[in-house]
Amino acid sequence: MRITSIAIAFALLAAAPAFAKDKKTFTAEAINAATFTGKLPSDAKEHPLAVKVQVLLDRIHFSPGEIDGLFGDNVEKALVAFAEANSLPATKVLTAEIWEKLQATSSEPVLTDYTLTDKDIAGPFIDKLPVKMEDMKSLKMLGFTDVGEALAERFHMSRDLLEILNPKAKFEKAGETVTIVKLSDRKPDKAARLEIDKVRQTVKAFGKDGALLAFYPASVGSEEKPTPSGVLKVTSIHANPVYRYDPKYKFKGVESKKPFTIAGGPNNPVGAMWIGLSEKSYGIHGTSDPSRVSKSDSHGCVRLTNWDAERIAAAVKKGVEVSFIDGKQASR
């Protein structure tokens, strides 16, 4: 296997204030009870309702990326896609119609308790994630650095949100109870086609009938190393891929003149999943830094959170069409 690359006008919100100013009100109770009132908070982008909106979107595979309690660009993108899939006016603003549809998708609390197990504590973990790729090649695996990082990724949360919800947690012993996002066990619908928008930095999955099944924010190429154009196909799917670096790629910050490999794991340069495409060296993959998805360039490939890459991998098979568009082309 050869793997190479690697405010808001949000008219909403419930009564609780933003956690940036008062973390004591940013609790599981406030988040589970949050509702849309049509009122815009005066000064903050963070809010308990942001978590609720993000979790509800994540459960139906209209991904907001990392669940962080922020009304950011990825939430905007997911709301537009959700409105499109439900034949509602496409808008970045949460409307009464969108909120009604979104709420109807699930009545379960968005946060719940979780008790740490011996397996959670055991890892294995690495002491520190190297910054330079050359320094990663000596590691036997690119695992998580600690229990907190593993939990945050497992439940699609930012580390900050996990810690805000669990201010007294140590994440050190089995039996400790913490608050986490309650995810859905809904399996991805099988996709007949993927559409990757290089301008909007998004991935959409469509069914055989052309219906929009799922949506994911992504980092898609850069001016230095652009993503391909046209129509490709899925050629391979690999979990926990080994990353192979070739000096011909001349990645910024990599000084090695010899090829080298980096072991698999969630903190591998291409994350926990690789979906190879029919143009050599290009693919759809995960990342070691979910907070940067759709907010930074990639090395030419399509980068998503690890969990979103895994969901796409479960929805496609070899031969599935992958269309690259420039933001002006309409979905067919």
Image (cartoon, helix red, strand yellow):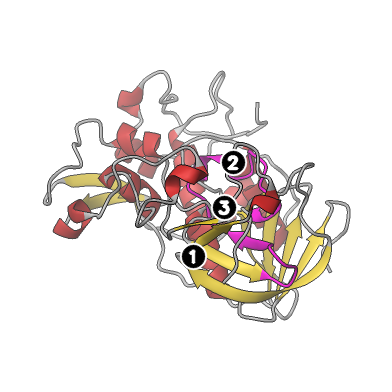
Q: Quadrant of the N terminus?
A: bottom right
Callout 1–callout 3 Cβ contact below 8 Å:
no
Mark 3–mark 2 distance (CA, rounded to whole Å): 49 Å
Q: x and y percent of residue 144 in the render?
A: 34, 49
From where the camera sits, is residue 200 visible?
Answer: yes
Q: Which mark is residue 100?
A: 3
**Disc 2 target residue:** 254
Up-down relation of residue 283 to residue 150 (above or below) = below
Question: Residue 252: within the magenta?
Answer: no
Which residue is outermost to the right? 328
Q: Count the marks.
A: 3
Which residue is outermost to the front? 257
Q: x and y percent of residue 268 in the render?
A: 47, 53
Tell me which numbered mark, 1 or 3, is placed earlier along the sequence: 3
Mark 2–mark 1 distance (CA, rounded to whole Å): 20 Å
Q: Quadrant of residue 149?
A: top left
Q: What element does badge 3 sit on?
A: helix
Q: Which mark is residue 52?
A: none
Mark 1–mark 3 distance (CA, rounded to whole Å): 41 Å
- Of badges 1 and 3, nearer the viewer stands 1
Magenta stretch in the rendered image: 277-302
**Disc 1 target residue:** 241
Q: x and y percent of residue 162 in the render?
A: 34, 39
In the depicted view, which residue is nearer to us: 175 or 250? Answer: 250
Q: Quadrant of residue 61?
A: bottom right
Task: Identify residue type, mark 2.
Answer: Val
Q: What element does badge 2 sit on?
A: loop
Question: Residue 278: within the magenta?
Answer: yes
